[in-house]
């Protein structure tokens, strides 16, 4: 029998207020901070507000980081390959959208 | 429980080399990876392939698996031998406590996972009805959340009642503070991140914050212009169809999409619906139209 429990929370949409640091991403994705930095250097993650002293990311970066880490781990591809895969996946998504809406 | 033929799952021979197994895995993993694949059941297939690879790539596990012999066929009722597990590192966890099949758990123990294939630690994905985003409201989800019990990673079924923020978009994440797994002895419970996607809606297709609605109109409404009723998430509106509209034309209703900030737009895509010519009067009307305005829609095709 599954254990069930109720929980009532009043959550927000993460993306709207999330301003994430390298440390946050590393904790949430359960990887080294170095790995997050590598993703930035490879162009997989965008830094917002680069004028501050610390890098900041949006919730979109969290989604991309998790996707990148899954591809890296499951398909055993290196960072450059992951970056390329993400770019191509985005292009496919755009094309799908165009087909769907006849744009 | 059913016997699983891991060699068959991977599409390799029983005497396949490590290199052949690895090659087969790479191919199948790319084909069925849930982030990449559009195949039906991609996720289930990916898990199956991952499980097979985990066994066949590890010499000890493969040897243990091979020891069962080729006497079993896939799907056949399987009962592990009583002395099973002697000499192999197997955990003591019961069935159904990992994302592996019962068969795998019976052989190797749920705790014998070498690396957590799904670090869905404190992340989950849910399919949401579009109405939840349009109007906001509470939804109940049943999630399998991993947690550490006596040093074993187990999956626990949790029912969560989540207040869905109005205006949430597909791909966005809801954070439930303190609802995640407790992963280390010193740590407090983590947060639970729920990524949202939409179930198909009978009327609207969501694209980011915008919605698309296909609206059928008659040929005369499209040709002459008209005011017709159209559904929107906020209720029925009167929509002006401009004269000379053609099929596929898009009318934009600003701010009538998903109530995010800023709100999305609603695009009404016109479809021309032909009235059936199934009685004499209708046929006469079509004939009169043909006589009154000879029209060749195929001139561009050179015929």
Image: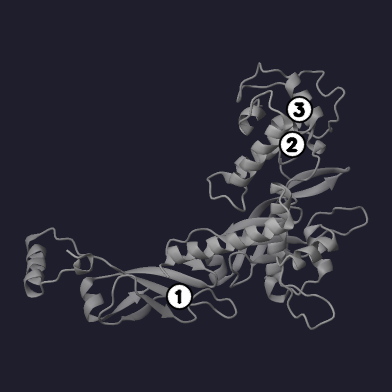
Depth order, front residue of B254/B157: B254
Whether residue A51 appears in this view of the structure is yes
* x and y percentages locating residue B251 in the rendered image: 38, 78
- Work out whether B244 lies above or below B73: below
Disc nearest the viewer among 2 and 1: 2
Which residue is label 2 attached to?
B54
Label 3 in the same subunit as label 1 = yes
Q: Mark 2 falls on what kind of element?
A: helix
**Left or right: B110 in relation to B238:** right
Residue B91, quarter of the rendered image: top right
Whether residue B101 appears in this view of the structure is no
Which residue is label 1 attached to?
B266
Which residue is label 3 attached to?
B62
- Work out whether B17 lies above or below B248: above
* x and y percentages locating residue B99 in the rendered image: 71, 41
Q: Quadrant of the C terminus of chain A?
A: bottom left
């Amino acid at each position: 029998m599954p254990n069930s429990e109720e929980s009532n929370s009043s959550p927000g949409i993460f993306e709207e207020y999330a301003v994430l640091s390298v440390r946050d991403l590393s904790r949430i994705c359960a990887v080294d901070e170095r790995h997050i930095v590598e993703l930035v250097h490879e162009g997989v993650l965008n830094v917002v507000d680069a004028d501050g002293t610390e890098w900041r990311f949006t919730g979109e970066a969290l989604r991309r980081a998790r996707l990148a880490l899954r591809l890296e781990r499951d398909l055993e591809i290196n960072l450059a390959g992951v970056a390329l895969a993400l770019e191509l996946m985005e292009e496919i998504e755009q094309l799908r959208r165009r087909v769907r809406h006849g744009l | 429980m059913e016997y699983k033929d891991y060699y068959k799952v991977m599409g390799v021979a029983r005497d396949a080399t490590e290199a052949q197994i690895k090659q087969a895995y790479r191919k199948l993993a790319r084909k069925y990876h849930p982030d990449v694949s559009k195949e039906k059941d991609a996720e289930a297939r990916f898990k199956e392939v991952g499980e097979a690879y985990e066994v066949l790539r590890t010499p000890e596990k493969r040897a243990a698996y091979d020891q069962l012999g080729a006497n079993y066929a896939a799907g056949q009722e399987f009962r592990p031998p009583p002395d099973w597990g002697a000499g192999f590192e197997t955990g003591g966890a019961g069935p159904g406590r990992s994302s592996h099949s019962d068969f795998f758990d019976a052989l190797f123990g749920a705790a014998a996972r070498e690396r957590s294939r799904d670090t869905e630690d404190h992340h989950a994905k849910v399919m949401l009805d579009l109405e939840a985003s349009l109007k906001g409201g509470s939804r109940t989800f049943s999630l399998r959340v991993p947690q550490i019990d006596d040093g074993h990673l187990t999956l626990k079924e949790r029912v969560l009642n989540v207040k869905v923020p109005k205006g949430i978009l597909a791909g966005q994440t809801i954070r439930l503070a303190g609802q995640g797994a407790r992963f280390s002895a010193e740590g407090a419970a983590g947060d639970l991140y729920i990524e949202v996607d939409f179930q198909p809606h009978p009327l609207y297709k969501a694209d980011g914050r915008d919605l698309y609605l296909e609206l059928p109109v008659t040929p005369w409404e499209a040709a002459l212009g008209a005011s017709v009723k159209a559904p929107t998430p906020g209720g029925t509106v009167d929509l002006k169809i401009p004269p000379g509209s053609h099929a596929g034309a898009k009318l934009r209703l600003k701010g009538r999409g998903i109530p995010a900030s800023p709100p999305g737009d609603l695009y009404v895509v016109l479809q021309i619906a032909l009235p059936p010519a199934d009685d004499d009067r209708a046929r006469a009307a079509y004939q009169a139209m043909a006589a009154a305005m000879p029209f060749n829609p195929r001139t561009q095709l050179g015929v």
